[in-house]
Image (cartoon, rainbow, N blue to C red):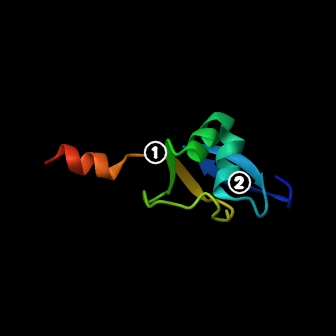
Amino acid sequence: MNQSTIPVFVNATRVEVPAGATALDAVRAWSADAASEVNAGGRSIVDSRGLPLDAAAPMSAGSILRLVARRDRASEDDASH
């Protein structure tokens, strides 16, 4: 690792991204297809605690990201009634 990159973990895989990279940049470094799914709204990025993370959030060394399927809450609410 050089000083212009930082390690970030996406779905338990270490990737190196440029300093100043966003969460979406980190996902893209892990998988271009997964980044496309985030852009299309099919997947969401969450942090290590499972809290939603904006795709534009800046990364810091050691950030941990996970990708989850995005669910439509309105459809789930309608189905439960």
Q: Name the residue: 30% across, 52% down.
A: 74
Q: Picture coordinates of residue 81 (x, y %)?
A: 13, 48
Q: Mark 1 falls on what kind of element?
A: strand
Count of marks overlaid on the render: 2
Q: Is residue 49 above or below residue 39?
A: below
Label of residue 12 in the image: none
Circle 1 is placed at which residue position?
68
Q: Residues under labels 1 and 2: Cα distance?
A: 21 Å
Q: Picture coordinates of residue 61 (x, y %)?
A: 69, 62
Residue farthest to the left?
81
Residue farthest to the top?
33
Q: Quadrant of residue 79?
A: top left
| Circle 2 residues within 10 Å: few <14, some 14–19, many ≥20 | many
- Between 61 and 59, the residue placed more toward the observer is 59
Q: Name the residue: 47% across, 60% down.
A: 52
Q: Name the residue: 57% across, 39% down.
A: 37
Q: Picture coordinates of residue 31 (x, y %)?
A: 66, 37
Q: Picture coordinates of residue 56 (x, y %)?
A: 65, 61
Are the two marked residues, 1 and 2, in contact with CB atoms closer than 8 angstroms?
no
Name the amino acid, label 2.
Pro
Q: Is residue 79 above or below residue 55?
A: above
Q: Quadrant of residue 63?
A: bottom right
Circle 2 is placed at which residue position?
7
Residue 12: in sight, yes or no?
Answer: no
